[in-house]
Image: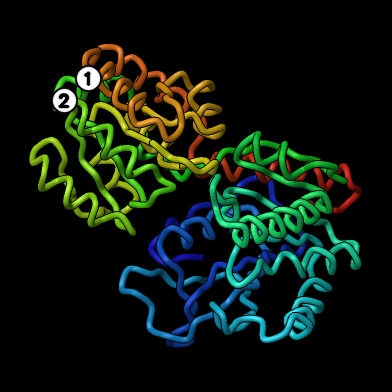
Amino acid sequence: MAQGQDEDAAPWPDQICVPYLMVLNLPLTRHDGRYWADPLWAKDLLLHTKYIPDLTLFCPIRDETPPADWLSIEGIKIISAGPPGHRLYPAAPILAAKLWPAIARAKLVHVGLGGWPYPMGWLATPIARLRRRFLLTIIESSFWRVPRGASLPKRTKAAIIERLNTVCVNSCDLALFTTSEYRDSLATSPRGRTYITPATWVDASQLLSIPAAQEKWRRKSGRFLFAGRLTEQKGVTDLIQAIRSTRCQVDIVGNGDLIELCQSAARELPGQIRLLPPVSYGDEFSALLDDYSALILPTRSDEQPRVMFDAFARGIPVIASSTSANVELIEQSGAGKVFKVADASELAEAMENALANPAQLEQLGLLGLDFAAARTHPAMHQHRAALILEAMRSAGHSHAT
């Protein structure tokens, strides 16, 4: 459990009461006899403990002093896979030898299929199948996929990772995906059940009521917001190009490889483009969102941005590129507009239309409130817990109190 989180809250009614092993490449830090995680990962782990009383995390471990804002992890068993990065896994047999007894103790094995230098799920999946354990994976991103025009070595590497991840997904008793595209492309011949469960980290306390959202709309400045990593895949160059041909005012929040491009654009177009310092995710980010009339999401990658739910929770519509993930959520919520991926001209037109129709933006934003209300971070976990329990029941596993 993470210190500083709602430690006294009662566990949820549905409980997965079997030894549950998570095999993930996401590292923790070990310091002063305790394990530490960044605040967002600690928050998510806490929610896992609400319905998994016997939870073990098999992950890389750093031995160093954690950043000041990291939280200690309690109530979870930790098994070290070794240090993260290129030093991890000096030989696959050594890592497999660590995984074998951990999987032997577990009844449910949850594998991750991402991470450097390779996903530990690639080793854990065949071991779990050999030991006849219930096998689960959750696909929330596809970092390995490369854009069109990538070099042959990069395309070859991406194809190999795609194939191995497809094999793992098809081996699972249950596979959960944040988008339909992930399920359609990876669950090509699944042995178990598959479901779509979008990723959201919004808390109920961050949801505005309709009257509160309407009151905030009366004080909007008309500015738009981009919040995310400043990279090509996030569409930052498309955004800068689009802004140059509009009257729109856009604030940019984030860090990344293209920060110098953003700084240069802000100097060139003072007032129209402002580069703001990053803010903490959660209440501080929610308060920042309240100042804006729309969130701009010009993403080029196919992952589902969680920030869409943060905008919806504050009654703010989204102007997003037409990736499969973005289109799926905007069609379901009705809380935004889409433009062609990597098309700065269409983005500029969408932004100009939005600027000229503030009343329509407010209507779209209020639709997002209803959509987000049933899709908070705890609700996402409760939904996933129910799907896991039902899949275990169907597979004949003893699972619940």
Residue under label 2? 247
Question: Alpha-carbon neighbours of circle 1 within 10 Å: few (<14), some, or many (≥20)?
Answer: many
The image quarter containing residue 159 is: bottom right
Left/right placement of residue 208 relative to residue 397 reads left
Residue under label 1? 355
Query: Which is nearer the eye, 30 or 165?
Result: 165
Q: Which mark is residue 147?
A: none
Name the residue rendered at 67%, 64% in the picture: 22
Q: How is the image coloured?
A: rainbow
Residue 193, image x and y in percent? 80, 41
Please indicate, yes or no, whether residue 208 appears anywhere in the rendered image. no
The image quarter containing residue 77 is: bottom right
Residue 162 lies, with reference to residue 107, above or below; the image says above
Name the residue rendered at 29%, 52% in the picture: 254
Residue 372, image x and y in percent? 45, 30
- Please state which amino acid type lies under the numbered disc 1: Leu
Please indicate, yes or no, whether residue 359 appears anywhere in the rendered image. yes
Spatial CA distance of label 1 from label 2 is 9 Å
Name the residue rendered at 82%, 49% in the picture: 170
Residue 370 lies, with reference to residue 21, above or below; the image says above
Name the residue rendered at 54%, 48% in the picture: 149
Left/right placement of residue 29 relative to residue 142 reads left
Task: Kindly indicate whether the residue at mark 2 contacts the one at mark 1 (C-beta within 8 angstroms).
Answer: yes
Residue 391, image x and y in percent? 81, 43
Residue 246, image x and y in percent? 20, 26
Query: Which is nearer the eye, 25 or 182?
Result: 182
Instruction: Classify mark 1: helix, strand or loop.
Output: helix
Instruction: Classify mark 2: helix, strand or loop.
Output: loop
Left/right placement of residue 166 relative to residue 275 reads right
Tell which tag, 1 or 2, sits nearer the viewer.
2
- Please state which amino acid type lies under the numbered disc 2: Arg
